[in-house]
């Protein structure tokens, strides 16, 4: 029998956030590879883009968390790192929302570039899917 691998989705404490209780035995925080963590921290300590992004992100969180919408936070972060071009990758099911976000960004002086998940669309039968297995209007049955 294969052992189940647990993750943050299985956590009931989220102690990594508030640090006021105990960590579950499977916690990724208490079971992290220390060498990998130290290597990551070293990247953030070294001068350069990784450090600048990490600092700007923490500053925006510290100043605005719970006070701004996520859209406002993204714009504040982009301004903090002097970003003008903002890429948006979204699911085709969220195109309306992404287009609205694009308009908001443009109004606020940014240069958004959006791409949906279907870019470069190829017929999935090219990779071995049977036609009847595809998600297409002719294969969707009405729910009763």
Image (spheres, grey):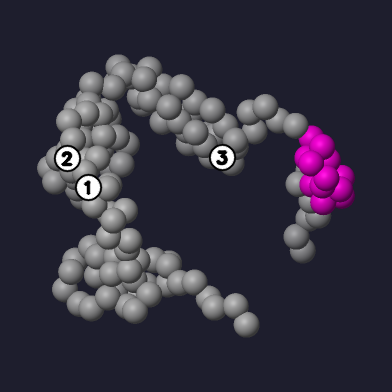
Circle 2 residue: 45
* Residue behind mark 1: 41
Which picture quadrant has residue 53? Answer: top left
Q: Which badge, 3 or 1, is on the more N-terminal residue?
A: 1
Quarter of the image that includes the C terminus: bottom right
Q: CA distance from mark 3 to mark 1?
A: 32 Å
Residue denoted by label 3? 91
78 and 47: which is toward the camera = 47
Image position of 70 with respect to 79: above or below: below
Disc 1 to disc 2: CB gap under 8 Å: yes
Task: Determine the CA span between mark 1 and mark 2.
Answer: 6 Å
Residue 64 seen in the current view: no
In the image, residue 43 above or below residue 143: above
**Numbered disc 2: secondary structure:** helix
State the CA–CA distance, disc 3 to disc 2.
34 Å
Label 3 residue SS: loop
């Amino acid at each position: 029998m294969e052992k189940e691998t647990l993750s943050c989705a299985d956590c009931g404490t989220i102690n990594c956030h508030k640090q006021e209780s105990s960590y579950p035995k499977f916690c990724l925080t208490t079971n992290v590879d220390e060498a990998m963590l130290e290597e990551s921290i070293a990247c953030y300590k070294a001068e350069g883009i990784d450090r600048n992004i990490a600092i700007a992100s923490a500053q925006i969180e510290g100043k605005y968390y719970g006070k701004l919408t996520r859209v406002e936070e993204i714009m504040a972060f982009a301004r903090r790192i002097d970003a003008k071009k903002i890429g948006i990758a979204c699911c085709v099911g969220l195109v309306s929302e992404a287009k609205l976000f694009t308009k908001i960004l443009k109004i606020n002086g940014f240069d958004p570039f959006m791409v949906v998940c279907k870019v470069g669309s190829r017929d999935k039968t090219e990779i071995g899917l049977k036609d009847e297995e595809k998600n297409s209007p002719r294969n969707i049955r009405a729910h009763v």
